[in-house]
Amino acid sequence: MQDKDLSSVFLFKIENTAKQFRKYKNRIFKEKGIDITSDQWILLKNINEEEGINQTELAIRSKKEAAAVTRTLDILERKKMIVRKANPNSRRVYNLMTSAQGKKVIEQILPIALEIRKQAKLDIPDEDVEVLNQLLDKIFDNLK
Amino acid sequence: MQDKDLSSVFLFKIENTAKQFRKYKNRIFKEKGIDITSDQWILLKNINEEEGINQTELAIRSKKEAAAVTRTLDILERKKMIVRKANPNSRRVYNLMTSAQGKKVIEQILPIALEIRKQAKLDIPDEDVEVLNQLLDKIFDNLK
DNA sequence: CATTAATAATTGATGCATCAAAAATTGATA
DNA sequence: TATCAATTTTTGATGCATCAATTATTAATG
């Protein structure tokens, strides 16, 4: 009772559920024949929501390291889903844009993302999701 | 309201909180001068709780892939915290044991792990943690 | 017994994470 | 203006994740 199996501790449950979520998304994307990963999708969606955003800002919004953003954008660029546009005011920054191809993928994924959320939330009332959100915010803050 | 910022969606909160937890642990271990990572610790602790366990079983308990277990054990072995012992009954399996050195590290970490849990749980009543556990179990199941 | 299955662990390829250091460019200040 | 500081992005090193394929060994079966 005092120091039991790690997986029963709430912090490990959070980790394991996060892993499960990531795996689930990657599996569904694969099944639907969409060549993208969970993390690539996060970046693509954020760029779509703010066309022209730069990498530093994107890193903040997506809560990723700048270094990780660089490398994942390389992949999205290789897949021709996004473009790095030179910024006329500063040669240090790129403005990130979704390509036509990228927009197609986004349209394809949006309904799937809703489905995934619905599935994850199955049999959980809205009030409980609200509680969950609050608890997670609190824990996140506690670990700052 | 309909399709807002990803980070406000509970699933992304779970992911972000998990990341924060991992970062927090790694930071504390580093600060305390303990040369171990969050994932290495999970394996070390599981081996300590069942000396002689084999890699397949360890993978199941730690919810990791066998391949990941192999490589993380390589690191723990290199650091001389664990030993892979030949199994007399089957040349396919190793029995995993913590070394004296490994036990020292475990003794060092155990109180720190409690501290971390306490910190994460700050200002959160036990009943809420119970609710959190149940919700996470449900979500985990939903994503199977 | 010989062949085929199944099992345990490893390896290779690829994606993403962190940290630290570097490169390129721009801004600030003496 | 020359130097130094700050900013944006990239790169290298290392750790961990997944998937698929391989190796070695053991079990099952005909």
Image (spheres, coloured by chain):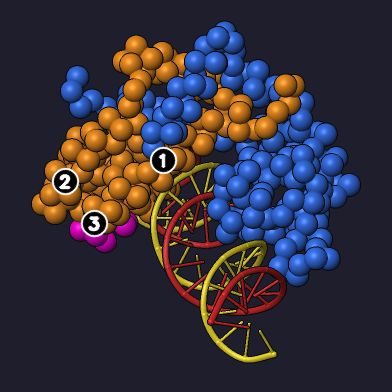
Chain colours: A blue, B orange, C red, D yellow
At 44% from the left and 40% from the top, the residue drawn is B20
Tell me the number on the disc at residue B126.
none
Q: In the image, are marks 3 and 1 on the same chain?
A: no
Q: Is residue A86 something that shows in the picture?
A: no
Q: Where is residue B24 in the image (x, y as percent from the top left)?
A: 37, 44
> Where does label 1 land, which residue?
A144
Along the horizontal axis of the image, is A19 left or right of B120?
right
Tell me where residue A87 appears, x and y as whole percent. Answer: 80, 63
- Single out the residue that lies furthest toward the left: B100
D13 shown above or below A144: below
Out of B69 and B110, give the one closest to the viewer.
Answer: B110
Q: Where is residue A127 in the image (x, y as percent from the top left)?
A: 55, 9
Instruction: Kindly identify which residue carries mark 2.
Output: B108
Camera-nearest label, 2 or 1: 1
Q: Pointers 3 and 2 in contact (CB under 8 A)? A: no
Q: Is residue B34 left or right of residue B5?
A: left
- Local secondary structure at mark 3: loop
Q: Specify the quadrant that holds the C terminus of chain B.
A: top right
Whether the residues at callouts 2 and 1 have beta carbons within 8 Å, the answer is no
- Type of amino acid under label 2: Gln
Magenta stretch: helix, strand or loop mostly: helix
How far is disc 3 from disc 2 in space, using C-alphas? 10 Å
Q: Which region is colored magenta?
A: B74-80
What residue appears at the point 23 percent right and 52 percent down from the top-left corner?
Answer: B32
Q: In this view, does B15 lie to the left or right of B64?
A: right
The residue type indicated by label 1 comes to Lys
Does residue A127 sit above or below A118 in this rendering?
above
The residue carrying mark 3 is B33
Q: Which chain carries label 1?
A: A
Mark pair 3, 1: CA separation:
20 Å
Q: Are marks 2 and 1 on the same chain?
A: no
The residue lying at 23 percent from left, 33 percent from top is B114
